[in-house]
Image (cartoon, helix red, strand yellow):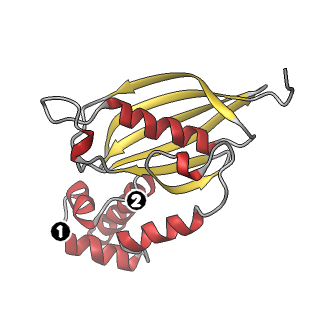
Amino acid sequence: MDHAQKRTRQRRLLKLLEANPLMNDEELARSLSVSVSTVRLDRALLNVPELRERMREMAEKTSGPLSAMKRGALFGELLGLELGQWGLSLLTPDHEMITNEEGTIGGHYLYAQAATLALASVEGGIATIESARIRYVRSIFPLERCIARSKVGIHKDDRTVVSVRTRIRDEDVFIGRFIIMFASNEQN
């Protein structure tokens, strides 16, 4: 029975890291209700590198060109990208991004991260956001690591739908659906 629990826990660990590859050992331990040393042992047995190494590997994989925009135009740090499929971005807001008396970060920062990640994720040349449906789930505070993951959906004519979900640990904080429109090759 103990061996079955261990395999189940290790599968959960892999699922958590698949959903959020930037979770540290403490966050994983909290989510799995185990000690940090148990998480480290499981990671070692599963050949899952520590957070710093995972981040380095993701950055190396992302060194390719961006299709619809320049890398410098991204809001947040690009961690992973497969053009036409998905993207992954990290934003750690600082105290200068506080916009109200409650000490929370302005929603426009989350929107900027999601919108630029959506544009970076599509293939097909020069693109712009035609429309967006967004939802802020909760306020965020300085130094909370916001991980945005994009998923490129259907492509029809000169438009592509991209969904972006931003999470802190295992909690959604922003959800967006963007319709990306590609510029016509014809000059008016």
User: Which residue is found at the position 13% from the left and 31% from the top?
Assistant: 102
Q: Quadrant of the C terminus?
A: top right
Kindly identify which residue carries mark 1.
Answer: 35
Q: Is residue 62 above or below residue 71?
A: below
Comparing 173 with 116, the one in front is 116
Tell me the amino acid under the disc marked 1: Ser
In the rendered view, would you say 162 is above or below 1? Answer: above
Q: Nearer the viewer, residue 152 or 44?
A: 152
Vertical order, 137 against 9 (above or below):
above
Badge 1 crowding class, 10 Å Cα cut-off, few under 14, some 14 to 19, many 20 or more, is few
Picture coordinates of residue 82 (x, y %)?
A: 63, 53
- The percent coordinates of residue 61 (x first, y second) are 58, 65
Residue 158 has which mark? Answer: none
Q: x, y percentage for residue 62?
A: 58, 61
Q: Residue at x 24, y 50 (%)?
A: 143
How far apart marks 2 and 1 lie (CA) works out to: 17 Å
> Considering the image in quadrants, where does the N terminus appear?
bottom left
Residue bearing the label numbered 2 = 17
Quarter residue 122 falls in: top right
Tell me what residue is drawn at x 64 percent, y 46 percent. 85
Up the image or down, 119 lies above or below 37; here it is above
Disc 1 is placed on an element classified as: loop
Residue type at mark 2: give it.
Leu
Q: N-terminal of the two: label 2 or label 1?
A: 2
163 or 42: nearer the viewer:
163
